[in-house]
Image: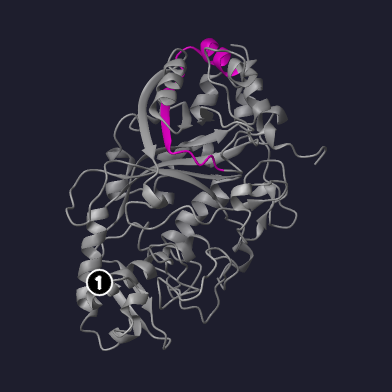
Amino acid sequence: MTKAFDPQEIQGNILRGYRRNLVRHLILEVTNAGVARRFLGLSVAGDSPDVPAITPDKTWPTKPEFCFNIGITFEGLRALRVPSRHLETFPTEFMQGMTKRAIKIGDFGESAPEHWPAPFDQPERVHIIASIHADAEGPLDRAQAQVERAFTTLGVRNGRNLPEGRVFFGYVDGISQPRFNHIDDPSQKDVDEPIDPLGTALLGYPTRQEGVTFRVPSPRDLGFNGSFNAFRILAQDAAGFETYLNDAATELMTHPDVNQLADPHRLERIGEGLDMHGALREVVAAQMCGRWRNGVPYELSPDAQYPEERVSLTNFDYSHRSRCPVGAHMRRGNPRGGPIVQRIANYTRRLVRRGMSYGPDFDPKNPDSQERGLLGNFIGANLGAQFEAVMCDWINLGLQDPRITSSNDPLLGANTPQTSWFDMSLPSGGTIRLRGFPRLITSRGGAYTFLPSIAAIKHLSELND
Protein backbone atom coordinates (compact mmCIF):
# COMPACT_ATOMS: atom_id res chain seq x y z
CA MET A 1 0.00 0.00 0.00
CA THR A 2 1.33 3.40 -0.92
CA LYS A 3 -0.40 5.16 1.97
CA ALA A 4 -2.22 4.32 5.18
CA PHE A 5 -5.57 2.69 4.59
CA ASP A 6 -8.48 5.07 5.20
CA PRO A 7 -11.86 3.33 5.51
CA GLN A 8 -13.64 6.60 4.70
CA GLU A 9 -12.43 6.17 1.13
CA ILE A 10 -14.76 3.20 0.65
CA GLN A 11 -18.53 2.88 0.79
CA GLY A 12 -20.12 1.80 4.03
CA ASN A 13 -21.69 -1.61 4.72
CA ILE A 14 -18.77 -3.49 3.17
CA LEU A 15 -16.26 -3.90 5.98
CA ARG A 16 -18.70 -2.91 8.75
CA GLY A 17 -22.45 -3.51 8.74
CA TYR A 18 -25.01 -0.77 9.36
CA ARG A 19 -27.32 -2.63 11.75
CA ARG A 20 -30.43 -0.70 10.74
CA ASN A 21 -33.95 -2.11 10.89
CA LEU A 22 -35.05 -1.44 7.30
CA VAL A 23 -33.59 -1.43 3.81
CA ARG A 24 -34.94 -0.32 0.46
CA HIS A 25 -33.20 -1.40 -2.71
CA LEU A 26 -34.00 0.70 -5.78
CA ILE A 27 -33.32 -1.01 -9.12
CA LEU A 28 -32.49 1.84 -11.48
CA GLU A 29 -31.91 2.53 -15.16
CA VAL A 30 -29.69 5.35 -16.44
CA THR A 31 -31.77 7.12 -19.09
CA ASN A 32 -29.80 10.37 -19.11
CA ALA A 33 -26.08 9.91 -18.55
CA GLY A 34 -25.42 13.58 -17.85
CA VAL A 35 -28.12 13.80 -15.19
CA ALA A 36 -26.96 10.53 -13.62
CA ARG A 37 -23.33 11.66 -13.48
CA ARG A 38 -24.33 14.99 -11.92
CA PHE A 39 -26.26 13.05 -9.27
CA LEU A 40 -23.17 10.94 -8.51
CA GLY A 41 -21.01 14.03 -8.18
CA LEU A 42 -23.40 15.64 -5.72
CA SER A 43 -23.77 12.37 -3.80
CA VAL A 44 -20.06 12.22 -2.98
CA ALA A 45 -19.80 15.95 -2.34
CA GLY A 46 -22.40 15.38 0.36
CA ASP A 47 -23.58 18.98 0.61
CA SER A 48 -26.71 19.01 -1.56
CA PRO A 49 -30.15 19.06 0.07
CA ASP A 50 -31.57 17.48 -3.09
CA VAL A 51 -29.32 14.42 -3.37
CA PRO A 52 -28.70 11.75 -0.71
CA ALA A 53 -25.04 11.63 0.28
CA ILE A 54 -23.09 8.44 -0.25
CA THR A 55 -22.30 6.95 3.15
CA PRO A 56 -18.59 6.18 3.67
CA ASP A 57 -17.23 3.69 6.16
CA LYS A 58 -16.83 5.71 9.34
CA THR A 59 -17.82 5.88 12.98
CA TRP A 60 -20.60 8.44 13.37
CA PRO A 61 -20.77 10.62 16.50
CA THR A 62 -24.50 10.95 15.77
CA LYS A 63 -26.35 8.23 13.91
CA PRO A 64 -27.44 9.54 10.48
CA GLU A 65 -31.11 9.48 9.53
CA PHE A 66 -30.32 7.01 6.77
CA CYS A 67 -27.36 5.44 4.98
CA PHE A 68 -27.11 5.45 1.19
CA ASN A 69 -24.91 3.39 -1.12
CA ILE A 70 -24.81 2.28 -4.74
CA GLY A 71 -23.73 -0.72 -6.77
CA ILE A 72 -23.30 -0.43 -10.55
CA THR A 73 -23.68 -3.24 -13.08
CA PHE A 74 -21.46 -3.63 -16.12
CA GLU A 75 -24.26 -2.24 -18.29
CA GLY A 76 -24.54 0.61 -15.82
CA LEU A 77 -20.89 1.51 -16.26
CA ARG A 78 -21.45 1.46 -19.99
CA ALA A 79 -24.52 3.68 -19.64
CA LEU A 80 -22.46 6.18 -17.62
CA ARG A 81 -20.04 6.29 -20.58
CA VAL A 82 -17.04 4.49 -19.13
CA PRO A 83 -14.70 4.05 -22.14
CA SER A 84 -14.56 0.61 -23.74
CA ARG A 85 -10.83 0.29 -23.05
CA HIS A 86 -11.58 0.54 -19.33
CA LEU A 87 -14.67 -1.68 -19.41
CA GLU A 88 -12.53 -4.42 -20.90
CA THR A 89 -10.36 -4.52 -17.78
CA PHE A 90 -13.21 -5.79 -15.58
CA PRO A 91 -13.50 -9.54 -14.85
CA THR A 92 -15.39 -11.71 -17.33
CA GLU A 93 -18.04 -12.86 -14.86
CA PHE A 94 -18.91 -9.26 -14.01
CA MET A 95 -19.07 -8.29 -17.69
CA GLN A 96 -21.37 -11.23 -18.46
CA GLY A 97 -23.63 -10.57 -15.49
CA MET A 98 -25.61 -12.85 -13.21
CA THR A 99 -28.16 -13.89 -15.84
CA LYS A 100 -25.54 -15.37 -18.17
CA ARG A 101 -23.75 -17.02 -15.22
CA ALA A 102 -26.95 -18.62 -13.90
CA ILE A 103 -25.95 -22.27 -14.41
CA LYS A 104 -22.65 -21.67 -12.64
CA ILE A 105 -24.39 -20.51 -9.45
CA GLY A 106 -27.23 -23.05 -9.49
CA ASP A 107 -29.93 -20.81 -10.97
CA PHE A 108 -31.73 -23.35 -13.13
CA GLY A 109 -35.12 -25.03 -13.02
CA GLU A 110 -37.45 -22.93 -10.88
CA SER A 111 -34.55 -20.55 -10.17
CA ALA A 112 -33.70 -19.93 -13.84
CA PRO A 113 -33.64 -16.31 -15.07
CA GLU A 114 -36.58 -16.96 -17.41
CA HIS A 115 -38.72 -17.23 -14.27
CA TRP A 116 -37.44 -14.03 -12.66
CA PRO A 117 -40.02 -11.25 -12.36
CA ALA A 118 -39.47 -7.72 -13.63
CA PRO A 119 -37.15 -5.91 -13.75
CA PHE A 120 -34.65 -8.79 -13.68
CA ASP A 121 -36.20 -10.23 -16.83
CA GLN A 122 -34.49 -7.35 -18.66
CA PRO A 123 -30.95 -7.42 -17.22
CA GLU A 124 -29.58 -5.02 -19.83
CA ARG A 125 -31.74 -2.27 -18.28
CA VAL A 126 -30.62 -2.89 -14.69
CA HIS A 127 -27.85 -0.31 -14.27
CA ILE A 128 -27.69 0.67 -10.62
CA ILE A 129 -28.92 -0.81 -7.37
CA ALA A 130 -29.19 1.98 -4.80
CA SER A 131 -29.62 0.85 -1.21
CA ILE A 132 -31.10 2.97 1.56
CA HIS A 133 -30.83 1.76 5.17
CA ALA A 134 -32.86 3.37 7.94
CA ASP A 135 -34.89 2.66 11.06
CA ALA A 136 -38.15 4.21 9.80
CA GLU A 137 -40.09 4.47 6.54
CA GLY A 138 -39.96 8.28 6.29
CA PRO A 139 -36.23 8.58 5.49
CA LEU A 140 -36.55 5.78 2.94
CA ASP A 141 -39.37 7.62 1.15
CA ARG A 142 -37.52 10.94 1.11
CA ALA A 143 -34.28 9.46 -0.21
CA GLN A 144 -36.15 7.47 -2.85
CA ALA A 145 -37.92 10.60 -4.10
CA GLN A 146 -34.55 12.34 -4.52
CA VAL A 147 -33.01 9.38 -6.37
CA GLU A 148 -35.97 9.14 -8.76
CA ARG A 149 -35.32 12.67 -10.05
CA ALA A 150 -32.14 11.38 -11.73
CA PHE A 151 -32.95 7.78 -12.69
CA THR A 152 -35.79 5.65 -13.96
CA THR A 153 -36.94 3.28 -11.23
CA LEU A 154 -37.50 -0.23 -12.60
CA GLY A 155 -38.29 -1.87 -9.28
CA VAL A 156 -38.24 -1.50 -5.51
CA ARG A 157 -37.47 -4.18 -2.94
CA ASN A 158 -38.07 -3.58 0.77
CA GLY A 159 -36.40 -5.58 3.52
CA ARG A 160 -36.55 -5.66 7.30
CA ASN A 161 -34.98 -7.33 10.27
CA LEU A 162 -37.13 -10.02 11.82
CA PRO A 163 -37.43 -10.24 15.62
CA GLU A 164 -34.41 -11.66 17.44
CA GLY A 165 -32.33 -11.41 14.26
CA ARG A 166 -33.88 -14.54 12.77
CA VAL A 167 -34.76 -15.54 9.20
CA PHE A 168 -37.97 -17.23 8.09
CA PHE A 169 -36.52 -20.72 8.64
CA GLY A 170 -36.25 -19.78 12.31
CA TYR A 171 -32.46 -19.52 12.58
CA VAL A 172 -30.64 -16.61 14.18
CA ASP A 173 -28.69 -15.11 11.28
CA GLY A 174 -25.73 -12.80 10.72
CA ILE A 175 -23.61 -14.30 13.51
CA SER A 176 -20.47 -15.00 11.53
CA GLN A 177 -18.99 -12.05 9.61
CA PRO A 178 -15.36 -11.50 8.59
CA ARG A 179 -13.15 -9.24 10.69
CA PHE A 180 -10.66 -7.13 8.76
CA ASN A 181 -7.21 -5.74 9.27
CA HIS A 182 -7.20 -1.98 9.93
CA ILE A 183 -10.89 -1.96 10.90
CA ASP A 184 -12.10 -1.27 14.42
CA ASP A 185 -15.68 -2.53 14.60
CA PRO A 186 -17.17 -2.14 18.10
CA SER A 187 -19.98 -4.54 17.18
CA GLN A 188 -17.38 -7.31 16.83
CA LYS A 189 -15.38 -6.63 19.98
CA ASP A 190 -16.30 -10.03 21.45
CA VAL A 191 -15.97 -11.96 18.18
CA ASP A 192 -13.00 -14.32 18.08
CA GLU A 193 -12.87 -15.32 14.41
CA PRO A 194 -9.65 -15.06 12.37
CA ILE A 195 -8.84 -11.63 10.98
CA ASP A 196 -9.07 -11.39 7.19
CA PRO A 197 -6.82 -9.28 4.95
CA LEU A 198 -8.41 -6.30 3.20
CA GLY A 199 -7.95 -8.09 -0.14
CA THR A 200 -10.76 -10.44 0.84
CA ALA A 201 -13.25 -7.66 0.08
CA LEU A 202 -11.35 -4.77 -1.54
CA LEU A 203 -9.44 -4.49 -4.80
CA GLY A 204 -5.80 -3.50 -4.61
CA TYR A 205 -4.73 -5.35 -1.44
CA PRO A 206 -3.10 -8.72 -0.73
CA THR A 207 -5.36 -11.73 -0.22
CA ARG A 208 -4.95 -14.86 1.90
CA GLN A 209 -3.34 -16.56 -1.09
CA GLU A 210 0.36 -15.83 -0.92
CA GLY A 211 1.43 -13.48 -3.69
CA VAL A 212 -2.13 -13.12 -5.05
CA THR A 213 -3.77 -9.74 -5.47
CA PHE A 214 -6.82 -9.49 -7.70
CA ARG A 215 -6.41 -7.24 -10.72
CA VAL A 216 -7.64 -3.68 -10.28
CA PRO A 217 -9.72 -2.44 -13.23
CA SER A 218 -8.46 0.62 -15.08
CA PRO A 219 -8.03 3.43 -14.46
CA ARG A 220 -6.87 3.00 -10.88
CA ASP A 221 -9.12 5.82 -9.71
CA LEU A 222 -12.06 3.70 -10.84
CA GLY A 223 -11.00 0.26 -9.66
CA PHE A 224 -8.94 0.74 -6.50
CA ASN A 225 -10.78 0.22 -3.19
CA GLY A 226 -13.78 -1.20 -5.03
CA SER A 227 -15.62 -4.45 -4.35
CA PHE A 228 -17.94 -6.76 -6.25
CA ASN A 229 -21.36 -7.81 -5.02
CA ALA A 230 -23.83 -10.54 -5.90
CA PHE A 231 -27.21 -9.01 -5.11
CA ARG A 232 -29.71 -11.85 -4.68
CA ILE A 233 -33.45 -12.12 -4.09
CA LEU A 234 -33.88 -15.54 -2.48
CA ALA A 235 -37.36 -16.87 -1.77
CA GLN A 236 -37.43 -19.17 1.26
CA ASP A 237 -40.04 -21.94 1.36
CA ALA A 238 -40.65 -21.69 5.11
CA ALA A 239 -43.78 -23.83 4.96
CA GLY A 240 -41.98 -26.50 2.94
CA PHE A 241 -39.09 -26.48 5.42
CA GLU A 242 -41.37 -26.99 8.42
CA THR A 243 -43.23 -29.76 6.58
CA TYR A 244 -39.97 -31.52 5.81
CA LEU A 245 -38.85 -31.30 9.45
CA ASN A 246 -42.10 -32.99 10.44
CA ASP A 247 -41.68 -35.73 7.85
CA ALA A 248 -38.02 -36.35 8.74
CA ALA A 249 -38.76 -36.48 12.47
CA THR A 250 -41.59 -38.97 11.87
CA GLU A 251 -39.26 -41.19 9.85
CA LEU A 252 -36.51 -40.98 12.49
CA MET A 253 -38.85 -41.95 15.32
CA THR A 254 -38.65 -45.59 14.19
CA HIS A 255 -34.92 -45.64 13.41
CA PRO A 256 -32.90 -48.01 15.65
CA ASP A 257 -30.32 -45.27 16.38
CA VAL A 258 -32.83 -42.53 17.17
CA ASN A 259 -31.70 -42.21 20.80
CA GLN A 260 -28.24 -41.19 19.58
CA LEU A 261 -29.81 -38.12 18.01
CA ALA A 262 -31.82 -37.06 21.07
CA ASP A 263 -31.66 -38.48 24.59
CA PRO A 264 -35.33 -39.11 25.46
CA HIS A 265 -34.56 -38.46 29.14
CA ARG A 266 -32.97 -35.02 28.53
CA LEU A 267 -35.11 -33.39 25.86
CA GLU A 268 -35.15 -30.08 27.76
CA ARG A 269 -31.58 -29.53 26.54
CA ILE A 270 -32.98 -29.28 23.02
CA GLY A 271 -36.04 -27.23 23.88
CA GLU A 272 -38.40 -26.68 26.76
CA GLY A 273 -41.64 -28.61 26.52
CA LEU A 274 -40.61 -30.68 23.49
CA ASP A 275 -41.59 -34.30 23.03
CA MET A 276 -39.33 -36.70 21.12
CA HIS A 277 -40.83 -35.79 17.76
CA GLY A 278 -40.39 -32.07 18.41
CA ALA A 279 -36.82 -32.59 19.57
CA LEU A 280 -35.97 -34.55 16.44
CA ARG A 281 -37.33 -31.70 14.30
CA GLU A 282 -34.82 -29.37 15.96
CA VAL A 283 -31.96 -31.86 15.59
CA VAL A 284 -32.66 -32.19 11.87
CA ALA A 285 -32.79 -28.41 11.50
CA ALA A 286 -29.54 -28.01 13.45
CA GLN A 287 -27.65 -30.63 11.49
CA MET A 288 -28.85 -29.33 8.11
CA CYS A 289 -27.65 -25.83 9.00
CA GLY A 290 -24.65 -26.49 11.26
CA ARG A 291 -26.20 -24.34 13.99
CA TRP A 292 -29.13 -24.82 16.29
CA ARG A 293 -31.89 -22.38 15.50
CA ASN A 294 -30.87 -20.19 18.46
CA GLY A 295 -27.40 -19.75 16.88
CA VAL A 296 -25.37 -22.19 19.01
CA PRO A 297 -22.84 -24.02 16.76
CA TYR A 298 -23.57 -27.72 16.39
CA GLU A 299 -19.82 -28.30 16.40
CA LEU A 300 -19.52 -27.08 20.00
CA SER A 301 -22.82 -28.41 21.34
CA PRO A 302 -24.05 -31.38 19.30
CA ASP A 303 -26.36 -32.70 22.01
CA ALA A 304 -27.95 -29.52 23.31
CA GLN A 305 -29.43 -26.36 21.85
CA TYR A 306 -29.23 -24.99 25.38
CA PRO A 307 -25.86 -26.19 26.75
CA GLU A 308 -25.23 -26.04 30.47
CA GLU A 309 -22.14 -23.88 29.96
CA ARG A 310 -21.90 -20.92 27.58
CA VAL A 311 -20.14 -21.64 24.29
CA SER A 312 -18.66 -19.26 21.72
CA LEU A 313 -20.82 -18.59 18.70
CA THR A 314 -17.81 -18.04 16.42
CA ASN A 315 -14.63 -19.56 17.87
CA PHE A 316 -14.55 -23.14 16.63
CA ASP A 317 -13.12 -25.30 13.86
CA TYR A 318 -13.85 -28.60 12.17
CA SER A 319 -11.85 -31.83 12.25
CA HIS A 320 -12.14 -35.42 11.05
CA ARG A 321 -13.92 -36.18 14.34
CA SER A 322 -16.41 -33.30 14.12
CA ARG A 323 -20.01 -34.05 15.02
CA CYS A 324 -21.18 -31.28 12.70
CA PRO A 325 -22.13 -33.02 9.42
CA VAL A 326 -19.67 -32.31 6.64
CA GLY A 327 -22.64 -31.52 4.38
CA ALA A 328 -24.21 -28.93 6.72
CA HIS A 329 -24.97 -25.60 5.10
CA MET A 330 -22.68 -23.55 7.31
CA ARG A 331 -19.77 -25.96 7.00
CA ARG A 332 -20.08 -26.15 3.21
CA GLY A 333 -20.13 -22.39 2.80
CA ASN A 334 -17.26 -21.76 5.25
CA PRO A 335 -15.17 -24.84 6.09
CA ARG A 336 -12.93 -22.69 8.31
CA GLY A 337 -9.65 -24.51 8.88
CA GLY A 338 -11.20 -27.96 8.63
CA PRO A 339 -10.08 -30.79 6.35
CA ILE A 340 -11.16 -30.31 2.73
CA VAL A 341 -9.79 -31.58 -0.56
CA GLN A 342 -8.69 -28.13 -1.73
CA ARG A 343 -6.65 -27.32 1.37
CA ILE A 344 -5.29 -24.08 -0.05
CA ALA A 345 -8.86 -22.80 -0.51
CA ASN A 346 -10.07 -23.00 3.12
CA TYR A 347 -10.25 -19.29 3.90
CA THR A 348 -9.76 -17.85 0.41
CA ARG A 349 -13.44 -17.87 -0.55
CA ARG A 350 -14.60 -15.80 2.40
CA LEU A 351 -17.56 -13.55 1.62
CA VAL A 352 -19.10 -10.59 3.41
CA ARG A 353 -22.81 -11.32 3.82
CA ARG A 354 -25.31 -8.53 4.30
CA GLY A 355 -29.00 -9.17 4.09
CA MET A 356 -32.50 -8.58 5.39
CA SER A 357 -35.73 -10.50 5.11
CA TYR A 358 -38.62 -9.55 2.87
CA GLY A 359 -42.26 -10.56 2.82
CA PRO A 360 -44.98 -11.06 5.44
CA ASP A 361 -44.54 -12.68 8.82
CA PHE A 362 -44.63 -16.47 8.91
CA ASP A 363 -46.49 -18.53 11.47
CA PRO A 364 -45.37 -22.20 11.44
CA LYS A 365 -48.70 -23.16 13.01
CA ASN A 366 -50.66 -21.50 10.21
CA PRO A 367 -48.46 -21.76 7.09
CA ASP A 368 -49.36 -20.02 3.86
CA SER A 369 -47.97 -19.79 0.31
CA GLN A 370 -47.06 -16.08 0.25
CA GLU A 371 -43.57 -15.29 -1.02
CA ARG A 372 -41.02 -14.34 1.60
CA GLY A 373 -37.28 -14.64 1.78
CA LEU A 374 -33.96 -12.82 1.89
CA LEU A 375 -32.55 -9.78 0.09
CA GLY A 376 -28.90 -10.79 0.17
CA ASN A 377 -25.60 -9.15 -0.72
CA PHE A 378 -22.54 -11.39 -1.08
CA ILE A 379 -19.51 -9.14 -1.26
CA GLY A 380 -15.90 -9.91 -2.18
CA ALA A 381 -12.97 -8.82 -4.28
CA ASN A 382 -13.63 -11.41 -7.01
CA LEU A 383 -16.99 -12.89 -7.99
CA GLY A 384 -15.49 -15.91 -9.74
CA ALA A 385 -12.95 -16.91 -7.11
CA GLN A 386 -15.27 -16.28 -4.18
CA PHE A 387 -19.05 -16.19 -4.76
CA GLU A 388 -19.21 -18.43 -7.83
CA ALA A 389 -16.63 -20.87 -6.46
CA VAL A 390 -18.59 -21.28 -3.22
CA MET A 391 -21.93 -21.67 -5.00
CA CYS A 392 -20.67 -24.12 -7.63
CA ASP A 393 -17.88 -26.14 -6.02
CA TRP A 394 -19.05 -26.24 -2.40
CA ILE A 395 -22.80 -25.57 -2.25
CA ASN A 396 -23.94 -27.48 -5.34
CA LEU A 397 -21.21 -30.04 -6.07
CA GLY A 398 -19.69 -30.81 -2.68
CA LEU A 399 -16.18 -31.00 -4.11
CA GLN A 400 -14.57 -30.15 -0.77
CA ASP A 401 -15.14 -33.65 0.62
CA PRO A 402 -15.66 -37.04 -1.10
CA ARG A 403 -18.37 -37.90 1.45
CA ILE A 404 -20.70 -35.23 0.06
CA THR A 405 -19.64 -35.05 -3.59
CA SER A 406 -22.72 -35.31 -5.83
CA SER A 407 -24.97 -33.90 -3.11
CA ASN A 408 -26.23 -30.32 -2.78
CA ASP A 409 -26.42 -28.05 0.22
CA PRO A 410 -29.59 -29.12 2.12
CA LEU A 411 -30.82 -25.53 2.59
CA LEU A 412 -29.41 -23.47 -0.28
CA GLY A 413 -28.70 -26.13 -2.87
CA ALA A 414 -30.52 -26.89 -6.13
CA ASN A 415 -32.29 -29.95 -4.75
CA THR A 416 -35.15 -32.09 -6.00
CA PRO A 417 -37.07 -34.64 -3.88
CA GLN A 418 -36.05 -37.39 -6.31
CA THR A 419 -32.29 -36.93 -5.89
CA SER A 420 -31.65 -35.01 -2.65
CA TRP A 421 -29.82 -36.60 0.26
CA PHE A 422 -28.13 -35.50 3.46
CA ASP A 423 -26.17 -37.57 5.97
CA MET A 424 -26.90 -36.82 9.62
CA SER A 425 -24.05 -37.56 12.02
CA LEU A 426 -24.23 -39.84 15.06
CA PRO A 427 -21.98 -39.75 18.15
CA SER A 428 -20.96 -43.34 17.37
CA GLY A 429 -19.40 -42.13 14.10
CA GLY A 430 -22.18 -43.53 11.95
CA THR A 431 -24.68 -41.64 9.82
CA ILE A 432 -28.37 -41.64 8.99
CA ARG A 433 -29.21 -40.63 5.45
CA LEU A 434 -32.19 -38.35 4.87
CA ARG A 435 -33.74 -38.13 1.42
CA GLY A 436 -36.57 -36.46 -0.40
CA PHE A 437 -36.30 -32.82 0.60
CA PRO A 438 -37.31 -30.18 -1.97
CA ARG A 439 -35.54 -27.06 -3.12
CA LEU A 440 -36.07 -24.80 -0.13
CA ILE A 441 -34.55 -21.58 -1.49
CA THR A 442 -35.33 -20.31 -4.98
CA SER A 443 -33.70 -17.40 -6.80
CA ARG A 444 -36.14 -14.64 -7.77
CA GLY A 445 -33.70 -12.24 -9.37
CA GLY A 446 -30.43 -10.49 -8.87
CA ALA A 447 -27.46 -8.78 -10.43
CA TYR A 448 -23.69 -8.57 -10.22
CA THR A 449 -22.66 -5.06 -9.21
CA PHE A 450 -19.44 -3.16 -8.69
CA LEU A 451 -19.26 -1.20 -5.44
CA PRO A 452 -17.02 1.74 -6.35
CA SER A 453 -14.96 3.67 -3.83
CA ILE A 454 -15.76 7.28 -2.99
CA ALA A 455 -12.99 8.41 -5.35
CA ALA A 456 -14.34 6.13 -8.08
CA ILE A 457 -17.84 7.62 -7.81
CA LYS A 458 -16.27 11.06 -8.20
CA HIS A 459 -14.34 9.75 -11.23
CA LEU A 460 -17.57 8.47 -12.80
CA SER A 461 -19.26 11.83 -12.22
CA GLU A 462 -16.54 13.56 -14.24
CA LEU A 463 -16.83 11.40 -17.35
CA ASN A 464 -17.95 12.95 -20.62
CA ASP A 465 -20.21 11.72 -23.42
In the rendered structure, the answer to whether residue 119 lies left or right of residue 184 reads left
96 vs 412, nearest the viewer = 412
Q: Secondary structure at mark 1?
A: helix
Residue 350, given in percent of the width and then of the height, sits at: 57, 54
Magenta part of the chain: 17-40
Nearest the viewer among 256 and 104 is 256
Q: Residue at x 59, y 45 (%)?
A: 382
Residue denoted by label 1: 278
Q: Nearer the viewer, residue 202 or 186?
A: 186
Residue 98 is one of the magenta-drawn residues: no
Rendered view: 225 above or below 426: above
Q: Position of residue 453 (x, y in %)?
A: 64, 31
**Coloured how?**
one colour
> Can residue 106 be seen in the rendering of this structure?
no
- Residue at coordinates 64% horizontally, 18% vertically from top-left? 45
Q: Quadrant of residue 123?
A: top left
Quarter the C terminus occupies = top right
Location of the N terminus by quadrant is top right
Image location (x, y in percent) of residue 440: 29, 56
Q: Is residue 132 visible?
A: yes
The amino acid on which the numbered mark 1 sits, given as a three-letter code, is Gly
| Residue at 56%, 71% in the rendered image | 341
Q: Is residue 23 magenta?
A: yes
Q: Position of residue 7 (x, y in %)?
A: 69, 37
